[in-house]
Image: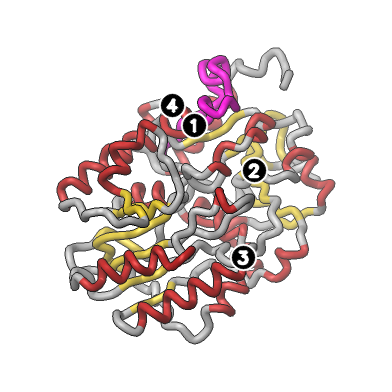
Amino acid sequence: MDRSYTSAVLVDSPIATAVAQVLPFYRAGTFCAAQSPLFLRRQWGQYLSPLRARVAQDCGLQVIARGQALTLPLRRGGVAYYPFNSQGNLNAVNNRQYRHVLILHGESNKAASVRPAARIYDFVCIAGPLARARYREAGIFTDADLRGGRLIEVGDLFVQDLYGYRPGQAGDYLLYTPTWEGYGSRRNDHSSLIGGFGRAVVKQIMSGGAHHGVIIRPHPYTGTLSRAHLIALRRDVMALARDFPTFIDLRDANPLLRLAMAGLRHFNAQDAAPISLALCDVSGMEAALLKARIPHRILLRQFSPPAALAQVYRVKSIAATGAPAPDHAALQEADAAHRALVFGHADPAMAAQPPAIRRAFVEEMIMHSRFWEGGRDD
């Protein structure tokens, strides 16, 4: 391979719509298809994706075999970015000709955000103070790692933009964004689709007449591992549609999810929908809504927030037992406090810069870092 790139993105995931989770970073200008192409390790599931042909040009998509992940066409000293903490990355990071940087594809309080495998990467880009504390308290990174700059705070750089939505006024749409079932045990399943919890909250809020319609945006992976979540989602959409104008947003949804939702009223995203309030689960959607500055509340089915978030969650969360609605000013204040905990920058000058410049800051920090001068020993 011609080693012509200084950076690249590597995706190794069996989920057909995984590339769709990374595309927002290209569309926002964080990555450029011509300069930082996306390399997708060949998986059978990827061939089922209707997105393949449509997105190839947007991200410079190149499909590679398993062994090629170890020899990406990067110049010596270049940077390989990883939006998924996949098992297949264990092989790719063995190439010491360039640096390996975990970016994930969002910021979340889920346990999956702090896997010990994060230590295999040279550097980890994190959103801010909350992620830093999360890694440290889990014992994955040490004080020496933190002091040495191995974790790089990049604010909302690698948090997805919510295309198709914008902050609205009172009386606009209610947005409901249930998360998927997730990997691992039921303990890691934070989806409010379980037991009709989310549907009940949506119905209660819509019954107050404060919104002229509800848009349901399920996580694109919903149903990948659990058919029960697909059944619950369809049941919820149909039940709400009997009483309120209800739309479902299936952009980037996996093929099975699209099939299961056939015949339902889809959200038309030609214009950005104004959202007066959003409901989300414990998931990456929290940070995405903070980035979009859309007021939101968190459906808390089974999660004990870290101490730093306790006061924020007291205002913003809705437990299965119900919770009083805060006034607009209190919710805005809680959102501001939440945003300050989630987003931070290794260099304050990064904050006001466009995405491409902020990523250049990151690469400059990596290039001048002395953390690995003695070689890797972990």
Of residues 217 and 156, the one drawn nearer to the viewer in this rendering: 217
Helix, strand or loop at label 1? It is: helix
Residue at (38, 77) in percent of width and height = 247
Q: Earlier in the sequence, mark 2 or mark 3?
A: 2
Identify the image quadrant of residue 167. bottom left
Tag of residue 134: 1
- Please, what is the three-letter code of the amino acid marked with disc 4? Ala
Residue 71 is situated, as x and y percent measured from the top left of the image, at 79, 41
Which residue type carries mark 2? Asn
* Residue lying at 34% horizontally and 63% vertically, measured from the top left: 165
Query: Which of the two residues, 225 or 17, is positioned nearer the viewer here?
Result: 225
Ranked by sequence position, the earlier of labels 4 and 2 is 2
Q: Start and end of the magenta stretch? A: 134-155
Circle 4 or circle 3, nearest the eye: 3
Instruction: Name the kind of residue labelled 1 in the image.
Output: Arg
Specify the amino acid type for callout 3. Answer: Ser
Residue 226, label in figure: 3
Q: Which numbered disc covers residue 346? A: 4
Residue 81 seen from this side: yes
Badge count:
4
**Front disc: 3 or 1:** 3
Q: Position of residue 318 (x, y in %)?
A: 32, 53
Quarter of image, res 210: bottom left
Residue 349 quadrant: top left
In the displayed orientation, state which residue is furthest to the front: 321
Instruction: Answer whether residue 148 is magenta in the image.
Output: yes
Give the secondary structure at mark 3: loop
